[in-house]
Amino acid sequence: DYLSKPTTLDALKAKIEHWVTTGGNVTVENDPAETTAPAAAPASAPADAPLDSTTLNEFTGGDASLRREILLQFMASDEPDAAELRQALAGDDCATIAKTAHRVKGASRMIGAQPYANVAERIERAGREGDLAAAKGCIADFEREQARLAAYLHSETGEA
């Protein structure tokens, strides 16, 4: 039994509740977050936006502070990952290209940054196939999408 990525907090909770054995008659109280109305979802972003807010809103259950924390964590990890990817591309290291691009892709999809994830996926595939020319051919798209996403996230979180 498993959950595929990306998942939602509700799906994770349901899976845990399914498999946890209580050993008797135990009453589980509702989580206070479940009884509180979720924060309003941000307005839908335009189709060309670097981030689809509905993905992250579904994952966080509308919790604005959790949303901000996840975005801040993404921001903190993305630049080191991007630097590692650039270094791997410069060093013609296909294994590291594939591994790092996979990490960028997964993190990006988790927050709803599909355009950035799509470029990372192309780089990952090229790295796995040993196609350095294709991987390096994606770098301009990667840099553009990373810059668009970073500007959006800085605006959204108020962090510089």
Image (cartoon, rainbow, N blue to C red):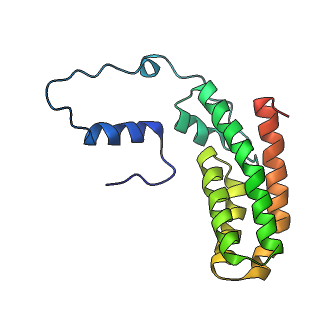
**Residue 107 rendering spot, x and y as whole percentages:** 63, 51
In the rendered image, the quadrant that contains the N terminus is: bottom left
The residue sitting at 73% across, 50% down in the picture is 78
Q: Residue at x 85, y 57 (%)?
A: 144
Q: Position of residue 14 (x, y in %)?
A: 34, 38
Where residue 29 sits, quadrant-wise, is top left
Q: Which residue, as the protein is rendered here, is positioned at the far left?
A: 24
Q: Nearer the viewer, residue 68 or 41?
A: 68
Q: Is residue 33 above or below residue 19?
A: above
Q: Quadrant of residue 10?
A: top left
Quadrant hosting residue 13: top left
Q: Residue at x 40, y 21 (%)?
A: 31
Question: Measured along the vertical axis of the image, is residue 93 above or below residue 52?
Answer: below
**Which sits in the foreground, 122 or 42?**
122
- Image coords of residue 125 (percent x, y): 64, 74
Residue sitting at x 41%, y 41%: 12
